[in-house]
Amino acid sequence: MSITRREFVSGLAGTAALATAPLAIRAAGDCPFRLSVINDEISGDFDHACSVAANDFGLQWIEIRSMWGKNATDLNADDIDRARQILEKYKLRVTDIASPLFKVHWPGAPMSAKGPRRDAAQIDAEFKKQPGVLSRCIDLCKAFQTDRIRCFDYWRLDDAKPYRAAINDKLREAARTCAAHNLILLLENEMDCNTGTGKEAAEVLAVIHEPNFMLNWDLGNSATFPGDTPYPDDYNLLPKKRIGHCHCKDTIREPGGKFEWAPVGGGMIDWVGQFRAFERDGYHYAVSLETHWHGGVPPAGSGMSVSEASSRISMKGLKETLAKAGAHC
């Protein structure tokens, strides 16, 4: 049966319970985290992505970003019904909605070099659409029984200081809207947005005090900034109880400030140290593979995509790194 509008806007009793419910870990496992993968890093075919995640990776969790050529926020009721049936088929739970919320230009500011080129009218129109994007994300949380929405803080400006207070107000407003639905708003540190590093994330968290406003800690994104050390330096600056999600990928720095993505365990990030610190500090939410690296070679004749082959290699590296940290997932 397809999801109705009434179902979308109904209460969140089941969803709110996810935040405190004990994790159902697979037999023989003692993983302290919600080990996950972003679905479209494997495949745009949601059924295939879920099959790989559940049957080949042995996961119980998956992060939703896009499927069947659509961003999650563009899914219609039939798409959602189909996706829910697939999740049930593979016994997968959703960590969060990895939405593009606030990944737009800030109106009135100099044009960001990071985002797509837009004229003033387009910038204003996209900015005004964001409350609708948030509303749609809230609906998706209810449909997929998750309590978290990922967001950004606008395309990165050369100098965000004149606009930072207003940007923070938008984040506070969104967090309060989410709080009314018992949902958590996760700000991702994204190198192309105004909060890129762990240090910048700590500064934002220090002035936005809403308890449901948390960080999607992405060490790989932070590591793209020359001289940045995500762990331990940036992590030590972060309020540990306000980390609500973690994206896992790795980074190789090149001369001249350039970087390349790498499979987890194949770059400069001290993931072993980070996972040990997570356990020490009581973090128990998602560690979610966001592969990004596309160096995997599909087996001859397999029909496998480069994305899937790369994600398989990076998930293997992630599990090996977790094992080295003492977390057998």
Image (tube, rainbow, N blue to C red):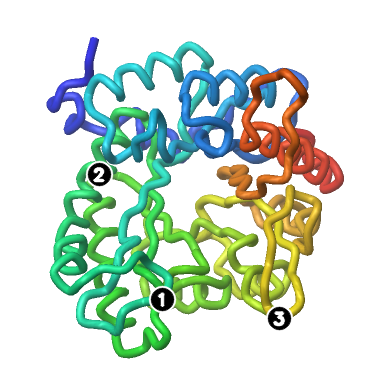
- Picture coordinates of residue 40 (x, y %)? 50, 36
Please identify the quarter of the rendering in which residue 284 is found: top right
Q: Quadrant of residue 143?
A: top left
Q: CA distance from mark 1 to mark 2?
A: 35 Å
Image coords of residue 1 (percent x, y): 24, 9
> Could you tell me residue 218's position as x and y percent?
58, 59
Q: Secondary structure at mark 2?
A: loop
Tag count: 3
| Label of residue 113 in the image | 1
Which residue is tagged 3? 256
Task: Pick whichever, 252 or 244, lies toward us.
Answer: 252
Where is 176 relative to 323, above or below?
below
Give residue 79's mark. Answer: none
- Residue type pointed to by label 1: Ala
What residue type is disc 2 on? His
Q: Horizontally, is 241 left or right of 17 in the view? A: right
Mark 1, secondary structure of its residue: loop
Instruction: Label 3: state its secondary structure.
Output: helix
